[in-house]
Amino acid sequence: MFENIQLSLLNACLLSFLISFLTYYFLVKKRPDFKIKNQSQKRLNALNIPPLGGVGMAISFFLSVRLLGEAEEIFIYISFFALAIAFLGVLDDLYNLNWKIKFFFQLLFVGIPVIYLNIFLNVENILNFKLDNNLNITFTIFWILLIINSINFTDNMDGFASINTSFICLALGIISFLSNQNYLADISLVLLFSISGFFILNFPPAKIYMGDSGSLFIGFVLGFISILFDWSPVNQNILYNSFTPVLLFFSIPLLDFATVFTFRIKNKISPTTGGTDHISHRLLKAGNTVKEVLGIFVLINILIFSLLSLSITYSQFSIIFLVLYVALIFYLFFKFANMDILD
């Protein structure tokens, strides 16, 4: 049905935004009294607001990418699994699935396209190992699962996941464009507009939450964009130089994941449960409002991306900017780790 229809990047982005926003507007207008079954976890969010943020983003992204003339077939294949993982998130939002079930299907939905499409981070080349791509495939699947779940962790406060993932999309779009990888730039911008349509109604006080349907979907797409990004293209089938600055753009989700994981392991709390010990919650405990916390992370994102962009643009000084970046991340980790958690 869509074979003879192609949209420009601008029109695809606008379509993505429009479908996303209208979907959420309809959901908010209906305003169902939402209740989670089998709810036993401590959450900051109210339970009567629908956490179905992945619905509009998944639909708008899939349709826009399908109609984007410059998009490669590989993304059409990946987008089917992105829809599948969004549906998994919907089920989790509705029925609070066991974490083992969620992880099994995450592994399945990530592993199939990685293996079938033969796309991977070439860690064997970097480590000078020859393991017939087994290490590459394993590490790639692990990396995407880490991105998915770290972004899922950031969905803990009105607008927080939306703000951080929007910056990641923008950064990936810009760096992909500057490195002449236009297909990745296009996908990143389409996703950015999908998130923007959601963010309007997710801005505090939120009328709809992202939920697992949204965070799993965004993490899945961004995870695949990160492994498809090729900083030094040498082979169309193998992503040769895999450890590139693009991976560092996920700093905030990974920082939150590391802070929460460390705290819970230290205090013998299951990392798979919900809680109010995230870095955003710690800033709330310190007396900041929700909007002030969002503003703080806007500034942190700008600072991180500025340091990484400078290290890329001025290669002769790259080590200086990277050292500053590492110092900033360690400072933030210890700063957040020593802050009180929200009661």
Image (spheres, rainbow, N blue to C red):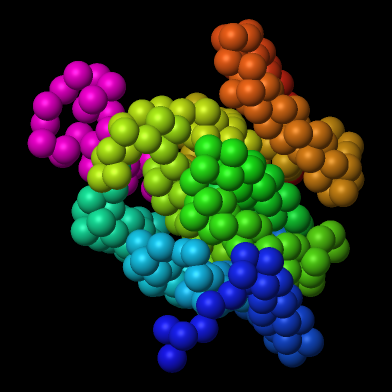
* Residue 169 percent coordinates (x, y): 62, 49
* Residue 303 percent coordinates (x, y): 75, 28
Residue name at image x 58 percent, y 15 percent? 315
Residue name at image x 84 percent, y 49 percent? 290
Q: Quadrant of residue 206?
A: bottom right
**Is residue 10 found inside the magenta-colored segment of the image?**
no
Determine if residue 88 is in view. no
**Please, what is the dominant secondary structure of the magenta stretch?**
helix
Determine if residue 288 is in view. yes
Magenta span of residues: 122-147
* Residue 245 percent coordinates (x, y): 52, 28
**Is residue 125 found inside the magenta-colored segment of the image?**
yes
Residue name at image x 49 percent, y 34 percent? 247
Q: Is residue 220 above or below residue 243?
A: below
Q: Quadrant of residue 125?
A: top left
Q: Quadrant of the N terminus?
A: bottom left
Q: Is residue 275 above or below residue 89?
A: above
Q: Is residue 328 above or below residue 83?
A: above
Residue name at image x 79 percent, y 69 percent? 201
Residue 179 shown left or right of residue 203 in the figure: left
Q: Is residue 143 above or below residue 67?
A: above
Q: Quadrant of residue 322?
A: top right
Q: Tell which of 18 and 95 is nearer to you.
A: 18
Q: Tell which of 331 and 234 is nearer to you.
A: 234
Figure label count: 0
Q: Quadrant of the C terminus?
A: top right
